[in-house]
Amino acid sequence: KQEVTQIPAALSVPEGENLVLNCSFTDSAIYNLQWFRQDPGKGLTSLLLIQSSQREQTSGRLNASLDKSSGRSTLYIAASQPGDSATYLCAVVETSGSRLTFGEGTQLTVNP
Amino acid sequence: NAGVTQTPKFRVLKTGQSMTLLCAQDMNHEYMYWYRQDPGMGLRLIHYSVGEGTTAKGEVPDGYNVSRLKKQNFLLGLESAAPSQTSVYFCASSYWGGAYEQYFGPGTRLTVT
């Protein structure tokens, strides 16, 4: 059974800092990996989707990398801002199906 | 373009009552999903559908039923609510399965007393 782990569970940084969020998964037979953002009391917003054949994806200040063989992905946030404060979740889709398996998320706080 | 919408936003039920949660999407997506989110357990898949008229079980299907009579709608039913079903329920959709992004609704917060 696929398991997805995110470390750390919570992170607090000063504004302007560059930071890295980590995601690991136990079964490397994945179709893709997706990073989401969740604001308190809200739904999930898709940030980046990396296909299994890709090494990274970029969107603005966000860069996500994928190392399928080692079962790891990172989300890099450059020049963090207070508006980046949210919970970030990663999820993997296994090659056997279309279902996502989620990690529990990293709660990020960016302090002004 | 409203994306994925869910009704109701909040609901309180007594043990044994029934209710239906409605999910609607206007993106012409084939795949739709129901998740529940609980503290310490993350998001878990309840049921999903790969097209109109189809449904399949996810990770935690017990106590729930679903129907996809129309492509744009996916209904989640609780026949006899239990306190263990207190949770936040999210609906999601994607164009065609795992290769595509999933888009989420705003959630329904359900409390069963």
Image: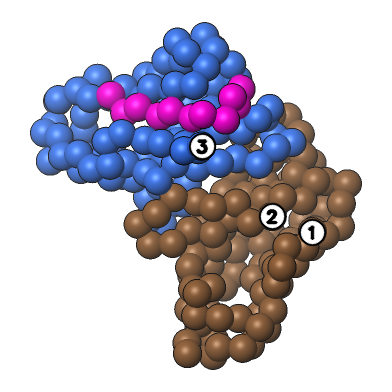
Chain colours: A brown, B blue
Q: Which chain carries label 2?
A: A
Residue B77 against residue B37 in the figure, above or below: above
**Is any part of residue B57 visible from this angle?**
no
**Residues rendered magenta in the picture:** B20-31
- Residue occupying the point 54% across, 21% down: B49
Whether pointer 1 and pointer 2 mark residues with C-beta atoms closer than 8 Å, the reply is yes
Quadrant of res A56: bottom right
Q: Residue A48: which disc?
A: 2
Circle 2: element type:
strand
Residue closest to the eye, A60 or A30: A60
Three-letter code for the amino acid on which mark 3 is drawn:
Asn
In whole angstroms, how far apart are the C-alphas of marks 3 and 2? Answer: 21 Å
Residue B53 against residue A1 in the figure, above or below: above
Q: Which chain carries label 3?
A: B
- Residue occupying the point 53% across, 73% down: A84
Horizontal placement of B31 versus A72: left or right? left
